[in-house]
């Protein structure tokens, strides 16, 4: 169930807040794509995409041209589907006056209205919501504080660094306190400290029950921040869901498990008796064993049994249950074909 | 219908657009278009005033009465003319073996009379009355209808209104508006209002300054009423409204809006020759019928072309204004429909 949004930051009138606080029906808490395709003339953008995105951080992962930005633009009606239907928390994207009350989008486009300061940029944007002068000022300053740009709020955006422009775009996306945030490559150009702060902000927003949809090339960051991932390749969704779930679906690649124990050689001899184990390799430091198995559940049960019979097992961890490996298995190999 | 919200949003769009429209470097040439006729009329005012001073000086040095000048007729000899008027203040002689030609100029201080003699016989008289208010009003009307409306305001509106959408596509900044909870119809309305404000301020200021410059040589003889200043200003504003809607639509229609702009220009230029029903589907038809001084083109036009001219009776002013507003509203409605289908695909733009 979607947790309620924090009322202290909400500029919405009381009735609207009550509507937000009431638990929405299931389809009103999801972003859904139903058999959505988009072609740019002869060129495929995305094809036959069917998805349901729950609240939390969802990362869109895929190589350049895989359809990440198209998917985001489809969600925000910057482009229309050639066929299929999209619903954002129950509403269709072709009603911008309703959609953008609940959705904020930080695009990859790096152009801003000319001559504006960071504060004026946000203020002007908020004025388009029909909000009052005072309300716009308050919301703009809050958003600027949230992305740590207070010191540069009254400088011209044209003079901002790449990282600052990224942050002001993020502030624009979240200034009106939306329930859905769509962020295209939001970590690009950020220095490590700001990157960490921004990731923490995403987590905070997701914990408030919002949808935070992020596209990224940086797989270890995706791994770190995502509740679920959507892997795209050549316009198709090749996998979606939690990383562990996606990994377990990839049957052609045996699961890799790294076991730290006191007698790895003895453990190797034991696990080889099992049919599902296809490979066991001693770790270079002599205190670990990397096992490849076709049936992870069965293998974990076996390990429990072994642990009770004389081998001292310190840790057991999946070695390829991460976005990097999943990406490599699903997309890396495909692109090499 | 949330009119209050829409009005607030239109104000928000207008606030942002005003800065861009008035101070955009790309749009500075529009100021030159508006300023050019002001400079033209300022130059004319200076020239007329100095010419008038010169004629007064000449008239004092060579005093001739208007009645004496009007009594001169062709067939008189040079001696007769000079006996009646005295020595001309200017004389030009071209002698060839077959004939002797001479042009003698006189002035009564207001008009210049030039007499053409061939072998000492007066063959022609030309009168130049520089600074005649009635004649100059016709000249201004012709300039206003055939130069200012059809070219300067036309291209000024191209510069202002086409950029409202197409310019933002080129700058890759249109998404700023499309990511706000603004109905596309409201966005079109807001941008149009901003464009109209900018163009009306620029071109009505130009019209006012032109009329001021035009009036200076005539002093108190030219009043606000007999200059038809209110009508000219009104027609200028309506031209901005009408052409603005055309070029807002053009900016939404074509990747290169100069193509529809050229097509509209041809259509407007051909208006004179179109059948009466088609004339009404244009901006210039309504604008010309609202102009306070009609400047008929027939007398200066090629005789063959004049056969093709199709006169449609000018509608009453109220119908002209209504017709123009209806054309504008239809174009805005069409633009709103286009805007609803508008997608951001900067790479293909």
Image: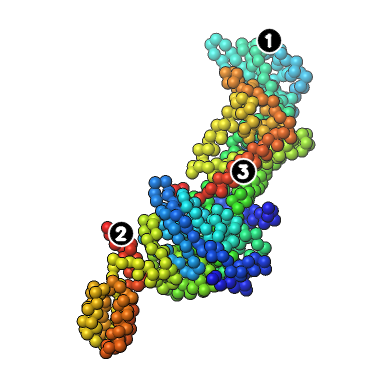
Q: Which residue is mark 3?
A: B333
| Identity of the residue drawn at 30% across and 86% down | A307
Q: Are marks 1 and 3 on the same chain?
A: yes
What secondary structure is found at the residue carrying circle 3?
Answer: helix
- In the rendered image, which quarter is residue B13 located in? bottom right
Compared across the picture, whether A62 is left or right of B187 comes to left
Q: Are marks 2 and 3 in contact (CB under 8 Å)?
A: no
Return the mark for residue A204. none
Quadrant in the rendering for residue A122:
bottom right
Q: Residue at x 38, y 57 (%)?
A: A236
Q: Nearer the viewer, residue B127 or A226?
A: A226
* Spatial CA span between label 2 and label 3: 48 Å
Image-based side of B173 in relation to B195, left or right: left
Asked if one can make out residue A284 in the rendered structure from this viewpoint, the answer is no
Q: Secondary structure at mark 1?
A: loop
Label 3 CA crowd tier, 10 Å (few <14, some 14–19, many 20+):
some
Identify the residue position indicated by label 1 in the image: B75
Tag 1 and tag 3, C-beta contact below 8 Å: no
Q: Residue at x 58, y 66 (%)?
A: A24
The colour scheme of the drawn protein is: rainbow
Residue bearing the label numbered 2: A335
User: Residue A312 at x, y = what percent?
Assistant: 29, 88
Q: Is residue A57 left or right of residue B8?
A: left
Circle 2 crowding by C-alpha within 10 Å: few under 14, some 14–19, many from 20: few
**Of discs 2 and 3, which sits in the foreground?**
2
Q: Position of residue B253 (x, y in %)?
A: 53, 42
Residues at marks 2 and 1, CA–CA distance in whole angstroms: 100 Å
């Amino acid at each position: 169930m979607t947790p309620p949004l924090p009322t202290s930051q909400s500029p919405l009138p009381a009735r609207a807040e009550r509507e937000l606080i009431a638990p929405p029906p299931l389809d009103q808490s999801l972003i859904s794509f139903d058999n959505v395709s988009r072609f740019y003339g002869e060129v495929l953008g995305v094809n036959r995409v069917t998805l349901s995105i729950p609240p939390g951080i969802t990362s869109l992962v895929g190589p350049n041209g895989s359809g990440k930005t198209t998917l985001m633009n489809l969600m925000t009606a910057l482009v229309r589907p050639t066929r299929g239907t999209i619903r954002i928390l129950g509403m269709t994207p072709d009603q911008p006056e309703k959609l953008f009350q609940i959705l904020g989008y930080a695009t990859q486009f790096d152009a801003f209205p000319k001559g504006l300061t960071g504060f004026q940029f946000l203020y002007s944007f908020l004025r388009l919501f029909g909000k009052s002068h005072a309300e716009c000022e308050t919301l703009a300053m809050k958003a600027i504080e949230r992305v740590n740009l207070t010191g540069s709020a009254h400088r011209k955006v044209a003079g901002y660094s790449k990282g600052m422009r990224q942050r002001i775009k993020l502030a624009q996306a979240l200034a009106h306190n939306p329930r859905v945030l769509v962020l295209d490559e939001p970590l690009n150009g950020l220095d490590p400290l700001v990157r960490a702060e921004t990731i923490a902000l995403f987590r905070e927003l997701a914990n408030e029950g919002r949808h935070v949809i992020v596209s990224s090339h940086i797989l270890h960051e995706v791994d770190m921040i995502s509740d679920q991932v959507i892997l795209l390749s050549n316009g198709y969704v090749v996998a979606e869901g939690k990383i562990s779930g996606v990994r377990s679906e990839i049957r052609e690649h045996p699961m890799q498990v790294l076991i730290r124990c006191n007698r790895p050689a003895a453990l190797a001899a034991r696990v080889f008796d099992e049919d599902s184990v296809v490979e066991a390799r001693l770790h270079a430091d002599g205190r670990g064993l990397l096992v490849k198995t076709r049936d992870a559940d069965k293998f974990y049960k076996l390990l429990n049994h072994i642990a009770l019979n004389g081998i001292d097992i310190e840790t057991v961890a999946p070695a390829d249950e991460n976005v990097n490996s999943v990406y490599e298995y699903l997309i890396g190999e495909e692109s090499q074909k | 219908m949330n009119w209050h919200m829409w009005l607030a949003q239109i104000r928000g769009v207008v606030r942002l657009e005003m800065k861009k429209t008035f101070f955009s470097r790309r749009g500075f040439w529009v100021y030159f278009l508006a300023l050019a006729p002001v400079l033209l009329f300022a130059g004319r005012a200076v020239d007329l005033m100095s010419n008038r001073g010169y004629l007064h000086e000449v008239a004092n040095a060579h005093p001739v009465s208007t009645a004496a000048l009007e009594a001169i007729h062709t067939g008189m000899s040079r001696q007769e003319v000079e006996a009646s008027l005295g020595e001309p203040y200017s004389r030009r002689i071209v002698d060839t073996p077959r004939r002797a030609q001479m042009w003698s100029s006189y002035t009564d201080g207001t008009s210049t009379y030039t007499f053409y003699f061939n072998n000492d016989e007066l063959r022609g008289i030309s009168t130049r009355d520089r600074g005649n208010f009635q004649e100059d009003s016709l000249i201004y009307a012709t300039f206003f209808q055939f130069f200012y409306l059809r070219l300067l305001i036309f291209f000024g509106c191209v510069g202002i209104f086409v950029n409202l959408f197409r310019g933002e596509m080129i700058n890759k900044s249109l998404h700023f508006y499309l990511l706000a909870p603004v109905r596309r119809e409201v966005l079109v309305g807001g941008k149009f209002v901003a464009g109209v404000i900018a163009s009306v301020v620029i071109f009505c200021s130009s019209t006012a300054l032109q009329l001021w410059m035009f009036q200076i040589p005539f002093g108190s003889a030219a009043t606000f009423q007999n200059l038809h200043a209110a009508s000219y200003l009104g027609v200028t504003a309506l031209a901005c409204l009408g052409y603005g809607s055309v070029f807002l639509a053009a900016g939404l229609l074509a990747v290169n809006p100069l193509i529809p702009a050229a097509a509209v220009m041809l259509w407007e230029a051909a208006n004179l020759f179109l059948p009466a029903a088609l004339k009404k589907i244009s901006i210039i038809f309504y604008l010309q019928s609202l102009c306070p001084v009609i400047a008929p083109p027939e007398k200066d036009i090629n005789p063959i072309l004049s056969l093709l001219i199709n006169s449609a009776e000018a509608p009453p002013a109220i119908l002209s204004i209504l017709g123009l507003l209806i054309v504008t509203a239809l174009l805005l409605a069409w633009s709103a429909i286009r805007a609803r289908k508008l997608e951001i695909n900067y790479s293909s733009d």
